[in-house]
Amino acid sequence: NAGVTQTPKFQVLKTGQSMTLQCAQDMNHEYMSWYRQDPGMGLRLIHYSVGAGITDQGEVPNGYNVSRSTTEDFPLRLLSAAPSQTSVYFCASSRRLSRQGKWEAISGNTIYFGEGSWLTVV
Amino acid sequence: AQKITQTQPGMFVQEKEAVTLDCTYDTSDPSYGLFWYKQPSSGEMIFLIYQGSYDQQNATEGRYSLNFQKARKSANLVISASQLGDSAMYFCAGYLGSARQLTFGSGTQLTVLP
């Protein structure tokens, strides 16, 4: 995977604990996002950002918080972990997305994913 | 409705042969992006190839090529000279119109036979 780094790769949390999943990209991409992948559910968007200081909610934002203070980093915070948040989390980035969240079909506007973070909440 | 359809839950191919994985999409917006990702059993999502709706030529990346037919709304992935390491789940995904997220197909499990 080109330039999207996620940490940690594996984590076990107790119900009620909080934690932060880190995501960094070194491609100077404007757009970053967090997805979760559950068995049989496909990937669902949690939050996304179209640039530093700009974030917005995706399909399943409840229980998660994000911030984008720099172009490179987009951490995902679990505020009070619940067993329903047991999932695989993917961070993704791409060069361009409009401020309204609309795709810009420019050449080379590829979406790259990090290697995933396996989170278990017990 | 914005939708990605993969109709082949599983495919088998002999090593060194070519294989085509099907993908159709549904959008009325002229601006969209289509992607193929490989997800091996280790779980990571590996980008393979991208086609923007305005790109004039079909995308190619090494052994991967995208057979993009706009009128038929299809974006099939062609893998040439299959290798054992190509065995994995393959997802077609699209950033379609006004949707704010990637829409994924249900995936095709490809098995390469020695």
Image (cartoon, helix red, strand yellow):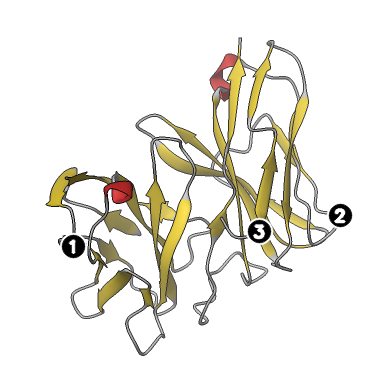
Q: Amino acid at mark 3?
A: Gly
Helix, strand or loop at mark 3: loop
Q: Amino acid at mark 1?
A: Thr
Say which residue appears at 35% left-offset and 59% top-offset.
B2
Tell which tag, 1 or 2, sits nearer the viewer. Answer: 1
Helix, strand or loop at mark 1: strand
Chain ID at mark 3: A
Which disc number belongs to residue B20? Answer: 1
Where does residue A35 sit, x and y in percent of width and height?
A: 56, 43
- Quadrant for the N terminus of chain A in the image: bottom right
- Using a 10 Å C-alpha cutoff, classify the residue at mark 3 as few (fewer than 14 neighbours), some (14 to 19) or many (20 or more): some
Is residue A8 placed above or below A29 in the rendered structure? above
Say which residue appears at 15% left-offset and 61% top-offset.
B17
Seen from this angle, which residue lies furthest bottom?
B56
Residue B105 seen in render: no
Residue occupied by mark 2: A69
State how far apart marks 1 and 3 are (Cα): 29 Å
- Please state which of residues A96 and B37 is positioned toward the viewer in this rendering: B37
Helix, strand or loop at mark 2: loop
Is the residue under label 3 in contact with that under label 1 (CB below 8 Å)? no
Say which residue appears at 74% left-offset and 68% top-offset.
A28
Seen from this angle, which residue lies furthest front?
B114
Q: Amino acid at mark 2?
A: Ser
Chain ID at mark 2: A
- Using a 10 Å C-alpha cutoff, classify the residue at mark 2 as few (fewer than 14 neighbours), some (14 to 19) or many (20 or more): few
Chain ID at mark 1: B
Is residue A89 placed above or below B46 in the rendered structure? above
Of the two numbered discs 3 and 2 on the same chain, state the one appearing first in sequence.
3
- Quadrant for the C terminus of chain A in the image: top right
Residue occupied by mark 3: A3
